[in-house]
Amino acid sequence: MAYDAETRAQLLDTVRRFVSEKLRPIEAEVAENDAVPEWALKEMRELGLYGLSIPEEYGGLGLTMEDECLVGFELGRCSPAFRSAFGTNVGIGSQGLVMFGTPEQKAKYLPGVASGEIVTSFALTEPEAGSDSASVRTTAIRDGDAYVLNGAKRYITNANKAHLFTVMARTNPDVKGGSGVSAFLVPRDLKGLSTGKPEKKMGQQGAHICDVYFDNVRVPIENRLGEEGQGFRVAMQVLDRGRLHIASVCCGVAERLIEDCVKYAAERKQFGQPIASFQMIQAMLADSRTEAYAARTMVLDAAKKRDAGQNVTMEAACAKLYASEMVGRVADRAVQIFGGAGYTADHGIERLYRDVRIFRIYEGTSEIQRLVIAREMMKG
Ligand code: COS
């Protein structure tokens, strides 16, 4: 639903205050403990953050892509690990169901997804299938009224907490590539499903990724998402949308870093004057502002096109590519502007520098985005 200007402003103001008053003050603690405290998760649920993109008829906020991106800009103003807690419910963990689910599947799961009672996960990547995601080896072989899943998934966000997985598995082992793959809604409590330990990571402590293992997991046929052989397309369409959301979060982190840099440059004195008066510092600030503005404009343009019903495979890839590379450069300049203080843990700049590195990798690497863009350009 498109919010009127006043409701939208209220929502953005609520998220902005939650981020600045509640989440930012505990960033360092969350990174230290590698866990988001339960009270913060509870408030996220109460604010409706788990259900930003879930249609209103199922209890979500039913935001347009544009409004979701505006919220993403706000969420980026604190450690991206917080967003990850509900990010799968908003994006890749729920959107297969929203876009391709049957009325029965939606009625069964979406209200819980919207409220945050059900945490979702998207299980595409495997040890041998990363960028080449059409080569998944996990199998789903039909046996009577069920599909039997065997295999392993890797680096699955929120797998340790998820109650429901969207799993891409090969239903036709004789067919190589995407058309042999189908998508399934797999509840965690099915026998034979297990998850590994959270990986130790470079950044975003408090957000977790784990392996998921399927050992003869019987998934009822009514849990297939879309038609047999459609699973790869389901995954790609989910990612088209997810990439825009991630791009919006990149813009938010960049804005926060720029604000921190401007403030620090005005306070920090060297050679008898604030470093903000030096043109080499000004040049870094100006480059960061220009690039962040460009990324924000791209994200909103692509989101509006998607809301208007256009295919935005190319635009979403452009936005994800540019915004994730942009925030990497902004974070690098921030370390430089803060100097020694940026390299130490005191201001949280080095933490954000590490946190944003994954944006150039997950939901499709920068290389894959370039490939998608070029392919779209060359389509007849
Ligand atoms: N929307 C709808 N359909 C799509 C699509 C999209 N965005 N992208 C591809 N498809 C369809 C194609 O049209 C094609 O259909 P046909 O077989 O009917 O022609 C089919 O899917 C296969 O597409 P394609 O030939 O492009 O597949 P490739 O194996 O060459 O790979 C890439 C495509 C590399 C783009 C894909 O594997 C990819 O995005 N990889 C990165 C995965 C990723 O982001 N992983 C992150 C993990 S999730 S956090």
Image (cartoon, rainbow, N blue to C red):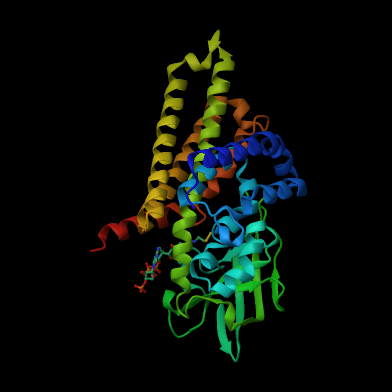
The quarter of the image holding the C terminus is bottom left
**Residue at image point 59% right, 77% down:** 223
Residue 295 x, y percent position in the rendering: 42, 40
| Horizontal relation, residue 304 to residue 15: left or right | left
**Residue at image point 31% right, 60% down:** 375
Residue 17 sits above or below residue 94 on the image: above
Q: Quadrant of ligand 1?
A: bottom left
Residue 326 x, y percent position in the rendering: 45, 40
Q: Quadrant of residue 51?
A: bottom right
- Along the line of sight, the residue nearer the viewer: 167 or 368: 167
Residue at far bottom of view: 144
Residue 104 x, y percent position in the rendering: 58, 75
Residue 139 x, y percent position in the rendering: 55, 80
**Residue at image point 57% right, 22% down:** 263
**Residue at image point 47% right, 60% down:** 239
Residue 130 sits above or below residue 139 on the image: above
| Horizontal relation, residue 222 to residue 175: left or right | right
Is any atom of residue 279 visible in this view?
yes
Callout count: 0
Residue 174 sits above or below residue 82 on the image: below
Residue at far left of view: 380
- Along the line of sight, the residue nearer the viewer: 29 or 132: 29
Is any atom of residue 317 visible in this view?
no
Residue at far top of view: 272
- Along the line of sight, the residue nearer the viewer: 71 or 167: 71
